[in-house]
Image: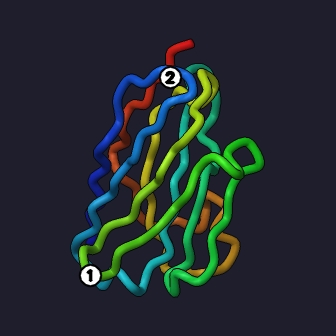
Amino acid sequence: QVQLVESGGGLVQAGGSLRLSCAFSGRTFSSYSMGWFRRAPGKEREFVAAITRSGLSTYYADSVKGRFAVSGDNAKNMVYLEMNNMKPEDTAVYYCAAASTAWRITAQTQYDYWGQGTQVTVSS
């Protein structure tokens, strides 16, 4: 069983930066592609970013492209989401997820395991 624990959320002003971390345990980290999703108040959960298990490919939602960066550290079993030039519309609960495939990892249905989420609030 995979366990995922997010950290790093908080309150930031518009234009600021945050780095989210996700600690992976329970299986072989390098066997999983990792994704970040978010749920804003009153909205459905949506894709933010993902990185394949090889680490060679990354994917981003159009709304965060050029501002967010996803990365992984196989030695530490960690995945990160660096968020820059943040906007009030980035306010959401952010979730880390793990998929045992590298195919179509922008889709929530591809993910087998989910973290509990971490709150990110961007003030204007």
What residue is rendered at 31% in x and 49% in y? 6
Q: Secondary structure at mark 2?
A: strand
What residue is rendered at 59% in x and 21% in y? 88
Image quadrant assignment for residue 58: bottom right
Residue annotated with mark 2: 122
Q: Quadrant of the N terminus?
A: bottom left
**Label 1 neighbourhood size at 10 Å, few (<14), some (14-19), many (20+)?**
few
Image quadrant assignment for residue 18: top left
Q: Tell whether 113 sits left or right of 107.
A: left
Q: Secondary structure at mark 1?
A: loop
Q: Amino acid at mark 1?
A: Ala
Marks 1/2: CA distance?
31 Å
What residue is rendered at 34% in x and 54% in y? 21
Q: Tell whether 89 sits left or right of 75.
A: right
Residue annotated with mark 1: 75
Please tell me which of labels 1 and 2 falls first in the chain.
Answer: 1
Q: Amino acid at mark 2?
A: Val
Query: Considering depth in this image, is 40 or 85 the residue closer to the camera?
Result: 85
**Label 2 neighbourhood size at 10 Å, few (<14), some (14-19), many (20+)?**
some
Image quadrant assignment for residue 79: bottom left
